Amino acid sequence: MYQKITLIGNLGRDPEQRYTPSGQAVTTFSVATSEKWTGQDGQPQERTVWWRVSVFGKQAETCAQYLRKGSKVYVEGRVQADPKTGGPRIWTGQDGAPRASFEITGSTVKFLSSRGEGGGAGGTGPMHEPDAVMAEDSDDIPF
């Protein structure tokens, strides 16, 4: 069996990096994906879904260094189901309303924002072309 999910969206907050006890880097960030349409009444409609993404290793370090709130990203990965429900992680928010979170383990993250747009890395670090600033598994062979 095989599963793969592809997301294109914007970061909802700055990434958070930490390390496992074995020293492996882990970076987490939230991505918002939206769909827009016109309802039958002619009014514009919009629905936003939030995804929690975790990436590991060198890719995690690159994401923590270059991504910022508002950055546009392309993420490929797999969905991590809640072991209790087999679906999204469900909890109760501070306001008492039920909440759900879709959790993704990212295998590929590509940065789609240029440095000057979407809350990118701003004026820090060396200049990179968008294709040069991508984090992928080191096992991939570029063709």
Image (cartoon, rainbow, N blue to C red):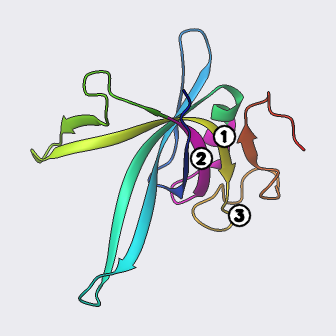
Which quadrant of the structure image shows residue 98?
top left
Q: Which residues are magenta?
A: 62-78
Residue at (29% x, 90% y) in the render:
42
Q: Which residue is mark 2?
A: 75
Circles 2 and 1 in contact, beta carbons < 8 Å: yes
Instruction: Give whichever of discs 2 and 3 has the lower sequence position.
Output: 2
Q: Which residue is mark 3?
A: 114
Instruction: Give whichever of discs 1 and 3 has the lower sequence position.
Output: 1
Tell which residue pokes out farthest to the right in this image. 143
Which quadrant, please, contains the N terminus?
A: top right
Which quadrant of the structure image shows residue 56?
top right
Which is nearer the eye, 17 or 29? 29
Whether the magenta-drawn stretch holds residue 75 is answered as yes
Mark 1 residue element: strand
For badge 2, the amino acid type reads Val
Which quadrant of the structure image shows residue 39?
bottom left
* Label drawn at residue 108: 1
